[in-house]
Image: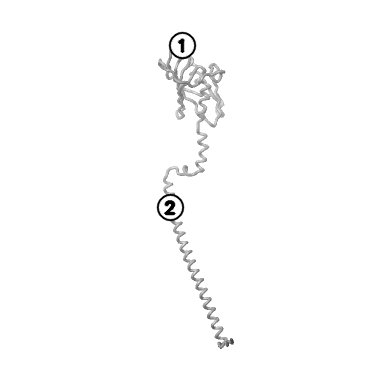
Amino acid sequence: MIQFNLLPDVKIDYIKAQQTRRTMLSAATIVTVISVGIFILSFGANQLQKKHLNDLNTDIKRETSQLKGNPDIDKVLTIQNQLQSLTALHDAKPAVTRVFSYLNQVTPNNTTISSMTLDLVTHSFSLTGSSDTLSSVNKYIDTLKFTTYKSDTVTDATPAFTGVVLSSFGLTPADNGKPSTSSYTISFSYDPNIFDIKQTVKLAIPSTVSTRSEVDKPTELFTKAPATTTQGGK
């Protein structure tokens, strides 16, 4: 089939220009719509983000205000402060486990303890127990009175115990072949340095008394309190 192009070249160029214009307008419209959409989304996201940040700031200010109202909140919440306080707390802790070693050193072999009270606030002791004779109880008191100690910071012999008093005593007569015994309650104060966990302490016991640390076969230190007849105080 034979076709004849009856349109002049100018008309053809015009039609092509129109088609190109429509294509460019369509593309520009699409790009504009996409740009406007992106702008709206960005603007909305920005506003939402600002609102969220403002809400967070408000919450932070409110919670901070509440926390600041609590006393010593920095000490409670700051982990570093808590960790730093551990060393000081440990250094301030008395080495109370030394009490058994001390009692074993100062208590005569023929004397036992049925109860003990250690007051870390008033730095005082109270011992209740029994011995073979009242004379042994008096020797126990003398041992406490004349026991001294030395430590890393205390180089001179210093009394470890002061104010030693026989608060009460009692006598249990011999019965059914059992020997008589003497009960006692001794009260005294101690030097806080002997329980200082930062120091190494060594007691010096009077050599005239036979204590558990100086005999080959010591008897039990703690026993049950026997029934006694109270005679008075010293």
Q: Quadrant of residue 172?
A: top left
Mark 1: few/some/many CA within 10 Å (<14, 14-19, 20+)? few
> Residue 7's spot in the image, x, y percent?
55, 87
Which amino acid, mark 2?
Answer: Asp
Q: Which residue is mark 2?
A: 59
80 and 12: which one is in front?
12
In terms of secondary structure, where does tag 1 sit? loop
> Residue 194's spot in the image, x, y percent?
52, 27
Mark 2: few/some/many CA within 10 Å (<14, 14-19, 20+)? few
Location of the N terminus (image quadrant)? bottom right
Which amino acid, mark 1?
Answer: Gly
> Residue 59's spot in the image, x, y percent?
43, 52
79 and 200: which one is in front?
79
* Vertical arrangement, residue 205 with respect to residue 93, above or below: above
- Total count of labels: 2
* Marks 2,1: beta carbons within 8 A: no
> Residue 162's spot in the image, x, y percent?
48, 23
Name the residue located 45 percent from the left edge and 60 percent from the top edge.
48
117 and 13: which one is in front?
13
Query: In this rendering, does residue 234 appear at all?
Result: no
Marks 2 and 1, the one that precedes in the sequence: 2
**In this rendering, which labeled residue sits more in front, label 2 or label 1?**
1
In terms of secondary structure, where does tag 2 sit? helix
* Vertical arrangement, residue 121 with respect to residue 77, above or below: above
Q: Which residue is mark 1?
A: 177
